[in-house]
Amino acid sequence: MLAIVGAVLFAIAFIINAAEISANHIFMPTSLMLLGLAFMALHVAGIGSGWGGRGRSRR
């Protein structure tokens, strides 16, 4: 899930950079790319990747 958010942020940063849209400092392409990298790092670390730990218990 976090990888999808990161990919969307990368796409938005690319569109802003390619269209040369002037935006405030929060929505600058560099800021969005850093946020995307943070979300990708969280995904790789296993945070937000879904259910974990226990599976079905066998009886």
Image: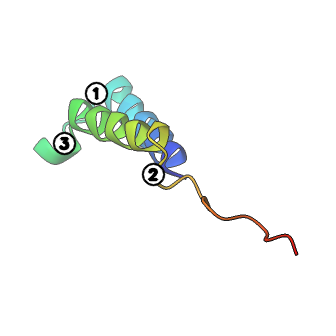
Quarter of the image holding residue 51?
bottom right
The residue under label 2 is 47
The residue under label 1 is 20
Indicate the position of residue 29 as horizontal and vertical percent values.
Answer: 27, 32
The residue under label 3 is 23
Do tag 3 and tag 2 residues touch (Cβ < 8 Å)? Answer: no
Between the residue at mark 3 and the residue at mark 1, the CA separation in whole angstroms equals 9 Å
Indicate the position of residue 55 as horizontal and vertical percent values.
Answer: 73, 64
Q: Nearer the viewer, mark 2 or mark 1?
A: 2
The C terminus appears in which quarter of the rendering?
bottom right
The answer to whether residue 24 is visible is no
Name the element at disc 3: loop
Q: Residue furthest front?
A: 59
Name the element at disc 2: loop
Q: Amino acid at mark 1?
A: Glu
Give above or below for 58 relative to 53: below
Quarter of the image holding residue 24?
top left
Lateral position of residue 9 relative to residue 28, left or right: right
Lateral position of residue 17 relative to residue 46, left or right: left
